[in-house]
Amino acid sequence: MTTQVIVLNGGSSSGKSGIARCLQAELPTPWLAAATARAGAHVIIDDVFLGGPASREPWRKALTGLDVPWVGVRCESGVAEAREIARGDRPKGMAAAQAEKVHEGVSYDVEVDTTHMESRACARTIAAHVT
């Protein structure tokens, strides 16, 4: 089965969106962030599973029958908080509150940590897992 959907889960300011952009450049075919996998498009989902495994369940059901690597995007809370402050578009404290919470009880096929790793390197790690 060919991978058509990649799910990225991580807290606010952990680097999911940056990784998603880099994955589009790293992967050999276009991947779109839209709900079109069943129509044959490649999809990258950027989500925040605040409710742990229960948050992932709707995606599991919707994506049944598709090859879906679940990706944990980790980032130390202090680093995520600094990014949050630099962005200026998030409530203060959101990144720190979500940094570990979104990963509680969630298992992954691959994990990356943006604390000391650039989005492009994370994207290459994920791309190697799906190509």
Image (tube, rainbow, N blue to C red):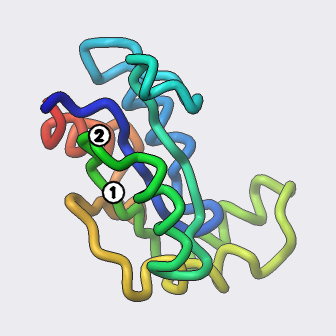
Question: Looking at the image, which residue is at 45% across and 70% down?
Answer: 75
**Residue 71 marker:** 1
Percent position of residue 53, x then y: 45, 79
> Callout 1: few (<14), some (14-19), or many (20+) C-alpha neighbours within 10 Å?
many
Q: 88 or 34, which lies in front?
A: 34
Question: Looking at the image, which residue is at 43% across and 87% down?
Answer: 104
Question: Looking at the image, which residue is at 42% across and 30% down?
Answer: 22
108 relative to 77 in the view: left or right: left
Marks counted in the figure total 2
The correct choice, above or below, for 100 with respect to 108 in the image is below
Percent position of residue 65, x then y: 28, 43
Could you tell me which quadrant the C terminus lies in?
top left
The correct choice, above or below, for 40 with respect to 107 in the image is above
**Residue 8 marker:** none
32 relative to 4 in the view: left or right: right
Q: Are marks 2 and 1 in contact (CB under 8 Å)?
A: no
Which residue carries the number 2 mark? 66
Q: Secondary structure at mark 2?
A: loop
Percent position of residue 24, x then y: 41, 23
Give the residue type that dot 2 points to: Leu
> Callout 2: few (<14), some (14-19), or many (20+) C-alpha neighbours within 10 Å?
some
Q: Quadrant of residue 79?
A: bottom right
Q: Quadrant of residue 23?
A: top left
Which numbered disc, 2 or 1, marks the residue closer to the eye? 2
The correct choice, above or below, for 30 with respect to 71 in the image is above
Question: Looking at the image, which residue is at 66% across and 68% down?
Answer: 82
Percent position of residue 69, x then y: 27, 50
Could you tell me which quadrant the N terminus lies in?
top left
Give the residue type that dot 1 points to: Val
Of the image marks 2 and 1, the number of the one nearer the N terminus? 2
Q: 68 or 15, which lies in front?
A: 68
Report how far apart the C-alphas of labels 2 and 1 lie in the structure. Answer: 15 Å
